[in-house]
Image (tube, rainbow, N blue to C red):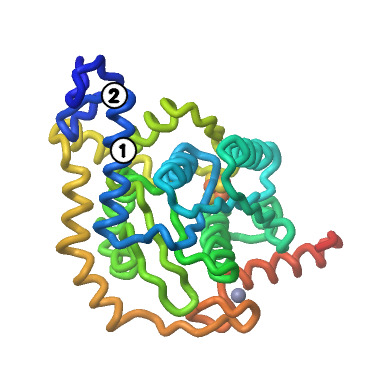
């Protein structure tokens, strides 16, 4: 198999694009896909300060490196959830990566704000992953807002986005459908959120990370109840196998034809938001979800005689 561009031996075959590339031409393809995403979705410019959410996985580290190589002003933010060895290893990978590439990094330990995940798991009677997701989204937004970043970037790829869209569509969940997209504008209390890898598949980001020698954190979280949307990803994977390009067509078609209608519907029916009385973050209730969890953990720990 030869590289479609330069005829050197190919290292990556991409059936959905009906092509194959050598290493250097694959990087050109990857860079072009990210640049197209940034331009078409008006994500950010070279003058913007970009905060990149870094979990330590392949997608977030790939995104950080690619944006830095393209010359953008990026700073990483890692949230240390305090989940034993798993969190220690994830943080070490992120720190080593940022040091190796001389990239700015901020780390927030959720234990320092009364939200260590082992406490949440022990004291809160809700699936730990749903609270964990909420806490991460809250602090990514809050730190971006408080520290004057223009935009928050996450490493979601096409497979993540298509699977999430599929799940939301199966339930016709209009509030989630209106909120799904690779570029969500800033609003009162929320910074702009973007997903510059949305045109690239998981396979493509994995190849990029591998070829660039990025050391990733890939151990499963001990609290994981199975990777999110695994079944949906498998179904879409089968569809893609039979009909290459259908995953992108599904997601891109939604962005063009479906999303505007759901945005309109949500404008008419969506909840009014006001600042949380504890932290000032936008919420539809008096206290935001994260402040409620924080208080509940503090109370339960006090009842159990543990220090907060
Ligand atoms: Fe958080 Fe659940 Fe992910 Fe673990 S698996 S990091 S608890 S969301
Ligand atoms: Zn709050």
Q: Is residue 76 above or below residue 292?
A: above
Residue shown at 17% from the left, 61% from the top = 256
87 relative to 158 in the view: left or right: right
Q: Is residue 71 above or below residue 261?
A: above
Residue shown at 23% from the left, 29% from the top = 14
Q: Is residue 232 visible?
A: no
> For residue 230, which quarter of the picture?
top left
Tell me the element at label 1. helix
Out of 47 and 82, give the one closest to the viewer. 47
Dot 2 corresponds to which residue?
12
75 relative to 304 in the view: left or right: left
1 relative to 26 in the view: left or right: left
Quadrant position of the N terminus in the picture: top left
Q: Is residue 253 above or below residue 218?
A: below
Out of 12 and 172, give the one closest to the viewer. 12
Dot 1 or dot 2: first in sequence order is 2
Dot 1 corresponds to which residue?
30
């Amino acid at each position: 198999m030869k590289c479609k561009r330069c005829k050197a031996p190919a290292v990556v075959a991409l059936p959905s694009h009906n092509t194959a590339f050598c290493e250097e031409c694959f990087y050109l393809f990857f860079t072009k896909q990210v640049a197209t995403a940034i331009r078409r979705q008006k994500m950010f410019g070279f003058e913007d300060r970009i905060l990149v959410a870094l979990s330590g996985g392949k997608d977030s580290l790939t995104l950080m490196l690619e944006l830095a190589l393209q010359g953008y002003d990026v700073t990483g933010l890692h949230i240390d959830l305090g989940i034993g060895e798993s969190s220690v290893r994830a943080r070490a990978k992120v720190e080593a990566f940022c040091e190796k590439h001389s990239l700015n990094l901020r780390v927030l330990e959720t234990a320092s704000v009364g939200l260590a995940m082992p406490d949440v798991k022990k004291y809160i009677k809700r699936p730990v992953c749903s609270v964990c997701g909420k806490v991460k989204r809250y602090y990514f937004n809050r730190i971006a807002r408080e520290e004057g970043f223009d935009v928050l970037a996450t490493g979601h790829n096409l497979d993540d986005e298509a699977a999430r869209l599929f799940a939301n569509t199966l339930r016709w969940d209009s509030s989630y459908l209106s909120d799904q997209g690779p570029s969500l504008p800033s609003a009162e209390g929320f910074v702009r959120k973007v997903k510059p890898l949305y045109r690239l598949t998981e396979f493509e980001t994995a190849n990029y990370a591998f070829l660039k020698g990025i050391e990733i954190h890939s151990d499963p979280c001990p609290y994981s109840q199975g990777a999110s949307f695994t079944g949906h990803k498998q179904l879409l994977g089968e569809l893609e196998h039979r009909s290459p390009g259908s995953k992108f067509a599904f997601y891109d078609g939604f962005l063009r034809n479906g999303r505007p209608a759901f945005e309109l519907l949500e404008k008419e029916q969506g909840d009014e938001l006001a600042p949380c009385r504890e932290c000032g973050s936008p919420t539809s209730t008096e206290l935001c979800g994260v402040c409620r969890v924080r208080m509940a953990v503090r109370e339960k720990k006090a009842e159990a005689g543990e220090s907060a």
